[in-house]
Amino acid sequence: MPFIPNRGTGPELLDLSPEFYTLEEHVGGLAELRLVNRYLGDIRVILKHLSTMAAGRVRDKWTVLDVATGSADIPVAIAGWARKRGIKVCITGVDVNSQAIRIARKVTGEDPLINFAVADGLDLPFREKSFDFVICSKMLHHFTAEEAVGFIQGISRIARQGYIIMDLRRSWVAYVLIFLLTRLFSRNRITRSDGPMSVLRSFTPRELESLVSCAGASEFRISKEPFWRMVLWVPAARGFGGKHRLQQVPRLLPVQPQRVPCDLVNAPPDIGPG
């Protein structure tokens, strides 16, 4: 059996409209996701890479966009991180699910550093270079490969200083562990359904590298993180060297303003050892 399964295509419950799950299930699922993000290090990883990208870049106020914000635990963490360091920041959280935005507003308690909007990650309604940093956590696997290329092109257009995408790494080991843990520690239908499916739908680092290249990026870094996470971070070209030297990847397609098909996007899935 290969170490890495073929990529799954089945829908997750949260890909469906709210009529397919109750408000209680949605609130409970997001609460459990906040616990996972806190105790398995997702928040720490995001802040680590954001700190690296922001280092040495002086502005009166940083603007941050969090795409697919869910219940906004990442904006809350960034706001706390900024307050401790005396950094002025304005954070916008967007989600295609209006119910998630209502939950996020309640969870954050109207934090003055955070505002929200309903927006589709594949059609973000923001001007070019309108945010310093764009962040997206555990959302990329919801897209097809071609949609993922378009999403990366879209946030690249919006980000002035750089962007960070964190997601799961597809693996049989991760799938089995998530399946067992969701059965042992959760009774939430969304968590028990979407947790394992998220692993099967996620990309591998090599697949992600292909997607980023298809999107037109020539300089980026993909890092493997604990608990089968991976992070793509693409800072602005200037200001990075030494141990943060960026990976050079040949541009495989001309950059185009629309989502583009790519031979790599349509290539067979990565099923080699991860």
Image (cartoon, grey):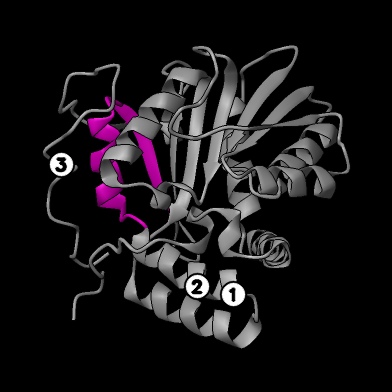
Q: Is residue 148 above or below residue 187?
A: above
| Separation of marks 2 and 1 at Cα, in angstroms | 6 Å
CA neighbours of label 3 inside 10 A, class few (<14), some (14 to 19), many (20+): some
In the rendered image, residue 167, in percent from the top left (x then y), is placed at: 46, 52
Q: Which mark is residue 43?
A: none
Whether tag 2 and tag 1 are in contact, CB under 8 A, the answer is: yes
Q: Is residue 180 above or below residue 15?
A: below
Q: Quadrant of the N terminus?
A: bottom left
Closer to us: 248 or 206:
206
Residue in the image at 62% along x and 59% along y: 41
Question: Which label lies toward us, 2 or 3?
Answer: 2
CA neighbours of label 1 inside 10 A, class few (<14), some (14 to 19), many (20+): some
Q: Which residues are magenta?
A: 202-224
Mark earlier in primary sequence (1, 3):
1
| Separation of marks 2 and 3 at Cα, in angstroms | 30 Å
Q: Which mark is residue 264?
A: 3
Magenta run includes residue 201: no
Residue in the image at 70% along x and 65% along y: 35
Mark earlier in primary sequence (2, 3):
2
Q: Quadrant of the C terminus?
A: bottom left
